[in-house]
Amino acid sequence: MKQVVVRCQGLCRTYQQGSVPVHALQSVDLEIAEGEFTSLSGPSGSGKSTLLNIIGGLDKFDQGRVSVGGVELGGLRESQLSALRLAKIGFVFQAYNLIPVLSALENVAFILQLQGVGKREQRVRAEQMLADLGLADMLHRRPGELSGGQQQRVAIARAMVTNPVLLLADEPTANLDSQTTAELLSLMRDLNESKGMTIVTATHDPLVIAYTSRQVGLIDGRISSDD
Amino acid sequence: MALAMLLKLSLRNVVLYRRRNAFLLIAISFAVGGVTVSNALIRGWQNDMLEMAVANLTGHIKVQAPGFVDDPSLANSLTLALPPILPGDARLYQGWAARIRLPAVVMSERATRGAQLVGIDPQQEAISFYRDLSIQGRGLAGVEDRSLLIGAALADALETKVDRRVVIMVQGADGRTREMGYRVAGIYDAPGELVEKMFIFTGLEALQQRAAGQRPLISELSIVLHEESNRLSVLQAVQEAYPDTDVRDWQALEPQFAELYNIVDSVMLIWFLLTMTALAFGLVNTLIAAVMERVRELGMLRALGMGRGFVVLQVVIESVCIMSIGVALGLLLGVFGVWLLADGIDLTAFSDGLEGWGIRARLVPLLAVEDLVGYGLMSVLIGFIASFFPARRAVKISPLMAMNR
């Protein structure tokens, strides 16, 4: 039986928009098992990004429980959440969010450095990860010298290099053309299948949804479908 | 190790945002450079004060008879073995001079003035302003020279000239007033009128013969050191070596100069802090703008798991890098400015008024290495403190809010 990596129980999140409360999430129950490639989809305002951010420890929740890799997020301090993100969660963002002044290799190694990994090991692991993602010839290029698809692959390498228990991707293909999107999705599926990486992505792109093994639909902050 | 990466990141960010940082660097360099030049001028003034006070027949340390300061007459004079045996390492001393100093009234055919008659050994006076005098006529030939050297301002007041005769009245060792006729051998030009009006020179032994009944009396032994910094230790040693005398340093003998001299360090520090505080406000403002410009990047780093401490450290390192580069450029600019002013600023037009403040007719800036190091370190420290405000702003914003900007 596969381990549960993400468990959400009765999760609620309400924002105040002026004096009007907006219920972004309403009693969401969700379990994601190890090795699943899950998409959270739905129209704008459905709560998919809010759910992803809460799972990633980037947003707070008002009610319910969330655990990632067996760690309960409720009640953790900011510094503990940072440590959790660093140790257990990899992030891929829509806008790549690479550090512009660092090369591809340095961007990937940077996260290992924050983890306190030795210099030689940092280099070996970062080079290997970039090579696995087809970027062996671009180690020393800075983000500005890479295409959008290449930048997003560097971002995935950065997210994967720490061997996280969970990879969260928020609209990872939103800024890419269809061919690059297909290449990137193939890569993510390969990572999922070959390394057993648990991936959760928030998206409204049908192409992305088609690549995932499990599709969770959200509408008005509630789970509307789970296939 | 992470520190090395943060340093690399900071230096590269300085280059990446070079246009904004260039303006910041220009502001820092001009502030530091300006303070360096202005404080070098103030330090030059301070040095002038010291040199004028010491060279003005005072010396760093003076040995006098007890009571001479209150009653400067031959009744309060000394008999010392000369040359004196000065305590400690001989390399501390630049030189010494034994003198008689007497309050005198000098009369020409046309006018009468008060002055100080000083009996000197011209060779020993290499330690005083006497050495640099420009003399019309001739200087004193030696200790037995019975002629006079008077200042140009006093000569004007007395309406006398070289080779004319004047009469000087002093109180002798026996307490009686003596009238002595002298021929004016030379008229000297000194940097200021006060000195020219105050001092009249004649040979030491000649004056001892005429006013002290041939006894080897002296009013003072003036000692000049190579370094002002040794003054207090040598003062103590000389006080112990001459226990029955009154030994004082120039700060006690010239209290008004001493007050000014001592206040200069505070003036420099206040001036530096005022300038750097104004700069710090600009720095904080610009750094906040710079941090806000990169808030998304910093938010992303926190989302990836970088702790608040690392984010603060990164902003602080970056600010300190900018400040350090700016300070280095500013110090270079300041040294260049001082080099341009190396010949000094001509203040001849104001020299009479400035003399009382210890400022010479040509104000030459003085650059002290310890000042440069001090400005450098204090500026970087100010940058370090100033950088905490933008760093605090950076970590106050949640990673999510930062990335959604």
Image (cartoon, coloured by chain):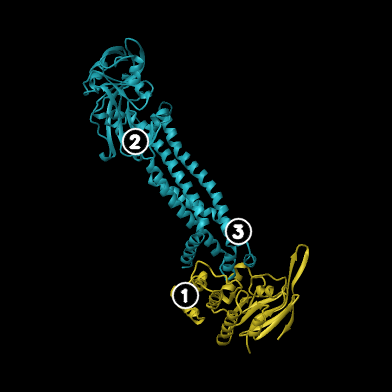
Chain colours: A yellow, B cyan
* Residue type pointed to by label 3: Arg
* Residue type pointed to by label 2: Leu
* Residue type pointed to by label 1: Leu
Q: Tell me the residue at 38%/23% (across/down).
A: B194
Q: Which residue is mark 3?
A: B393
Quadrant the C terminus of chain B occupies? bottom right
Mark 2 chain: B
- Most distant residue in the top direction: B109
Q: Are marks 2 and 1 on the same chain?
A: no
Counting residues from the start of the chain, the first of labels 2 and 3 encountered is 2
Label 2 secondary element: helix
- Image height of B30 relative to A97, above or below: above
Count of numbered circles on the image: 3
- Image height of B397 relative to A7, above or below: above
Q: Which residue is mark 1?
A: A139
Label 3 secondary element: helix
Residue B255 in picture, x, y percent from top left: 42, 30
Mark 1 chain: A
Q: Nearer the viewer, mark 2 or mark 1?
A: 1
Query: In the shown orientation, is residue B29 left or right of residue B197?
Result: right
**To which quarter of the image does residue B130 belong?**
top left
Q: Tell me the residue at 23%/30% (across/down).
A: B83
Q: CA distance from mark 1 to mark 3?
A: 34 Å
User: Label for residue B235?
Assistant: 2
**Residue nearest the viewer, comparing B43 with A213:** A213
